Image (spheres, rainbow, N blue to C red):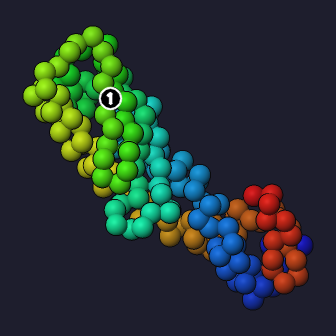
Amino acid sequence: MKFSELNDIVKENAREDIVEELYPDYIQQPMNDELTKELKNITGVSGLKAYIDFESDASYDPTMFFGSLTAKDIKNLPFGDLINDDTAVINLDMLNDEELDIHIDGDIEYTKEEMDAIESAISEWYFDVCDKLQTYSNEIISYFYSDEFIDEVFSDFDFTEEGYLEDKYLI
């Protein structure tokens, strides 16, 4: 039986079952895709991927991103004036909830003082972008838990008369 064929009470039970049994795993990828689009809007960079950590302990904002910045990208970012290398590539990755791994490949060797200033500027920019992504994720997460989203996504799945998914492993 399709979702649309369920009566309203059973649909509500089905929605609750879907959220309880399948979330947050089911919405992880759609959320990450939506956050990655917003990340491109915020930064103007297309080579970055956003990620929301639904397993976080809430001691930090669970939204982060990773990827590489090319020399072309770098020139258009707030710290671009600190990187004087047309071959530079900056790789970004979160090591844990507070530590950003910044790796710069290029032709120029920077002094310790220069690297400290570069890493500080990149970190400031990175965590500012993460704050914006977290705000956006807070705004859109309600949609991913909405009846509208659940009804649309699960409309083609088969349900029992009681409103349980026939096969949860298809997801």
Q: Residue at x 38, y 44 (%)?
A: 94
- Residue 103 lies, in percent from the top left, at 32, 29
> Where is residue 136, by image quadrant?
bottom left
The total of numbered circles placed on residues is 1
Q: Secondary structure at mark 1?
A: strand
- Residue 12 lies, in percent from the top left, at 70, 83
Q: Residue at x 21, y 44 (%)?
A: 124
* Side of 100 where 1 appears, left or right: right
* Side of 162 where 136 appears, left or right: left
Q: Disc 1 marks which amino acid?
A: His
> Where is residue 109, by image quadrant?
top left
Out of 50 and 72, give the one closest to the viewer. 50
Picture layout, residue 138 above or below residue 160 = above
> Where is residue 108, by image quadrant?
top left
Can the viewer see residue 103 in this picture? Answer: yes
Picture layout, residue 49 above or below residue 21 = above
Picture layout, residue 156 above or below residue 87 = below
Out of 93 and 128, give the one closest to the viewer. 93
Q: Which residue is under mark 1?
A: 103
Q: Residue at x 59, y 52 (%)?
A: 29
